[in-house]
Image: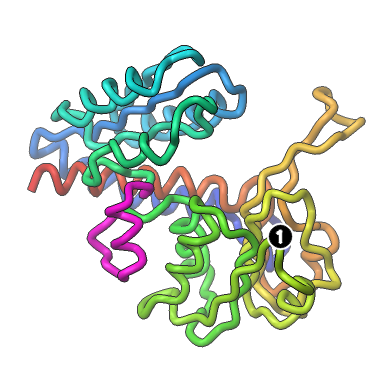
């Protein structure tokens, strides 16, 4: 899809990472270890079914064995925790991913904290969150912000001393994204501002940013007049909006008004085809690493 010289092709970069991972998977298999990833999905949320399906396909292509556990919507929290406990104790399962969102009667924080930190390939366990905040690279990082960092590195974007605005303060993207970029290290050392629904004059913050990471979940929120010429735009948002030309009557757009921002940006991710493929690539990378650690 991407053709303009400033459009970052997330699919191509994700394919490059998966090619690199293939050698590590082959090395593990020579030692008799096959990386294993367990998916747990509760209910029949259409988006969750699609997301898990894409992850299953990516695992199969790389040679990771995946298994998917689908539980009814009415499953109790206790029963879900029992399943996670069994997966924690299963040697051939190196990574566990519980697909969010979960039904309202199940506490996500409890579920994420029940997965063993060494199998938490989503990077949501409090131990891994704490390691991230401390700059300890022995933990697993959340896949989407880790994917953004890889896009920056492999696109030649310099973050050292850069002004970065992260739009959104969620636990999955916003907060860990800010933590990663302000650490000492590669693709970090940035000055980070987190903007959210209570921020005054978001446009002013964005206008001074060298890099904008949009993760608010508001369709095409970032407009051209919010962007400094030459700024790098990483669009994490996934929003479904009406579209009379589509067979389904809707289409997916990001948090950035791509058509109007792209001519101004120095680098910009498309949506789809930008950050999304990188999220899956980072999940695969975390799973391979978990298998390597288990085999060491």
Answer left or right for 79 relative to 292.
right
Whether residue 193 is visible, yes or no, is yes
Q: Is residue 66 magenta?
A: no
Q: Is residue 126 magenta?
A: yes
Q: Which residues are magenta?
A: 123-139
Give the quarter of the image for residue 44: top right
Q: Position of residue 127 (x, y in %)?
A: 27, 53
Whether residue 1 is visible, yes or no, is no
Q: Is residue 50 above or below residue 125?
A: above
The structure residue drawn at horizontal position 36% and vertical position 80%, both measured from the top left corner, is 184
Q: Is residue 141 above or below residue 45?
A: below
240 or 74: which is nearer to us? 74
Please give the residue where the numbered disc 1 appears in the rendered image.
197
Q: Position of residue 247 (x, y in %)?
A: 83, 23
Q: Is residue 284 above or below residue 233?
A: above
Give the quarter of the image for residue 206: bottom right
Q: Position of residue 79 (x, y in %)?
A: 33, 18
The structure residue drawn at horizontal position 39% and vertical position 76%, both measured from the top left corner, is 183
Question: Which type of secondary structure does the marked residue at label 1 adopt?
Answer: loop
290 or 28: which is nearer to us? 290
Give the quarter of the image for residue 139: bottom left
Q: Residue furthest right?
A: 244
The structure residue drawn at horizontal position 27% and vertical position 64%, both measured from the top left corner, is 137
Answer left or right for 243 relative to 169.
right
The structure residue drawn at horizontal position 81% and vertical position 38%, both measured from the top left corner, is 241
Q: Position of residue 119 (x, y in %)?
A: 25, 41
Answer left or right for 114 relative to 160.
left
Q: Is residue 17 above or below residue 105?
A: below
């Amino acid at each position: 899809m991407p053709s303009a010289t400033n459009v970052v092709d997330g699919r191509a970069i994700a394919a490059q990472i998966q090619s690199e991972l293939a050698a590590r998977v082959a090395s593990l298999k020579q030692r008799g270890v096959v990386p294993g990833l367990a998916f747990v999905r509760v209910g029949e949320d259409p988006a969750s079914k699609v997301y898990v399906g894409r992850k299953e396909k990516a695992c199969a292509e790389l040679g990771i064995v995946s298994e998917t556990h689908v539980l009814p919507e009415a499953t109790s929290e206790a029963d879900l925790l029992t399943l996670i406990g069994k997966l924690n104790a299963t040697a051939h399962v190196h990574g566990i991913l519980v697909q969010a969102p979960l039904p309202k009667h199940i506490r996500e924080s409890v579920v994420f904290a029940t997965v063993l930190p060494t199998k938490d390939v989503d990077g949501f366990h409090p131990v891994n969150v704490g390691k991230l905040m401390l700059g300890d690279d022995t933990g697993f990082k959340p896949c989407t912000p880790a994917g953004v960092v890889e896009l920056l590195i492999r696109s030649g974007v310099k973050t050292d001393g850069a002004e970065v605005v992260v739009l959104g303060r969620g636990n999955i993207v916003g907060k860990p994204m800010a933590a990663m970029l302000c650490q000492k290290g590669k693709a970090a050392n940035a000055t980070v501002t987190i903007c959210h629904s209570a921020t005054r004059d978001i446009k002013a913050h964005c206008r001074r940013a060298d890099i904008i990471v949009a993760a608010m979940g508001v369709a095409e929120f970032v407009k051209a007049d919010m962007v400094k010429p030459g700024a790098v735009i990483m669009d994490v948002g996934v929003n479904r909006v009406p579209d009379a030309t589509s067979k389904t009557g809707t289409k997916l757009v990001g948090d950035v008004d791509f058509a109007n921002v792209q001519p101004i940006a120095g680098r910009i991710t498309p949506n789809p085809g930008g950050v999304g493929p990188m999220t899956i690539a980072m999940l695969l990378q975390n799973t391979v690493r978990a298998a390597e650690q288990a085999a060491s």
